[in-house]
Amino acid sequence: MERVKFDDNGLAPVVAQDVATGDVLTLAYANREALEKTLESGEAHYYSRSRAELWRKGATSGNTQRVVEVRLDCDGDALLYRVEPRGPACHTGAKTCFFTTLAGEGVGVAVGDAGAPERFGTVLERLAGTISERHRHMPEDSYTASLIRRGTPRVAQKVGEEAVEVVIAALGEDRLAEETADLVYHLLVLLEERGVGIDEVAKVLSDRHG
């Protein structure tokens, strides 16, 4: 503990990493108490700068992080929590907070090319996160929330209707991309309403097709 160099505010940045996949999940901060709680409990604790209080990851959402290992960087002023996440790390419902790419050959929009479209996987993950957030808060003016309120039969019906629209668009060679986008959105709402994560679907696809 004495090797950790906390800043003038008594904080050190913490990177949380999925120990199984290597994915970087989030960047947060810890003070001495948060680090002590993490080491004692084996559960990720952080310090919220906006609320000025200690918090345990998943205390309200249930999306906890079991800490397998805590590492200190070479300068002693940053920490790495290697964790086993139980649920998404991001408040949007996405698996990781880092789902927007600014540059490089990964997913996202390259810097200096504002007109370039994001790759499908990035958009899908962010959209699923937004739908999950709407489900948690159920705002009155949200179309997503209104669909979920009407239950599985209505959401499933919308998926069927949008699937028909895709077929019509394909046969007419018009608006296929737009109708497919509508179908994907409603399918994600159905998955959210039924409690099936897109990671589960991805695993099935991966198992089937390698």
Image (spheres, rainbow, N blue to C red):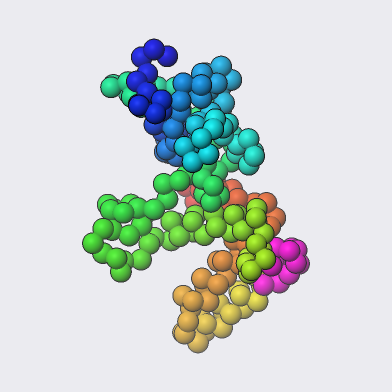
Residue 90 versus residue 122 in the image, above or below: above
- In the displayed structure image, the side of residue 49 where residue 139 appears, left or right: right
Could one spot residue 17 in this view of the protein? no
Which of 56/43 is in front? 56
In the rendered view, tell whether residue 53 sits above or below residue 5: below
Helix, strand or loop for the magenta stretch, by majority: helix
Tell me where residue 138 appears, x and y as whole percent.
67, 59
**Residue 155 falls inside the magenta stretch:** yes
Where the N terminus falls, by quadrant? top left
Give the left or right position of residue 157, taking residue 56 as reference: right
Q: Residue at x 23, y 62 (%)?
A: 112
Q: Nearer the viewer, residue 15 or 175?
A: 15
How far across and how far down the image is residue 188, in percent? 59, 61
Residue 75 showing in the rendered view: yes
Q: Which residue occupies the extreme bottom position in the image?
A: 172
Q: Which residues are magenta?
A: 146-158
- Seen at 49% across and 51% down, the residue is 209
Q: Is residue 31 left or right of residue 190?
A: left
Residue furthest to the top: 2
Q: Is residue 85 left or right of residue 110?
A: right
Vertical placement of residue 10 versus 170, above or below: above
The percent position of residue 163, horizontal first and vertical second, equals 61, 74
| Residue plotted at (54% across, 54% down) | 129
Residue 149 in magenta stretch: yes
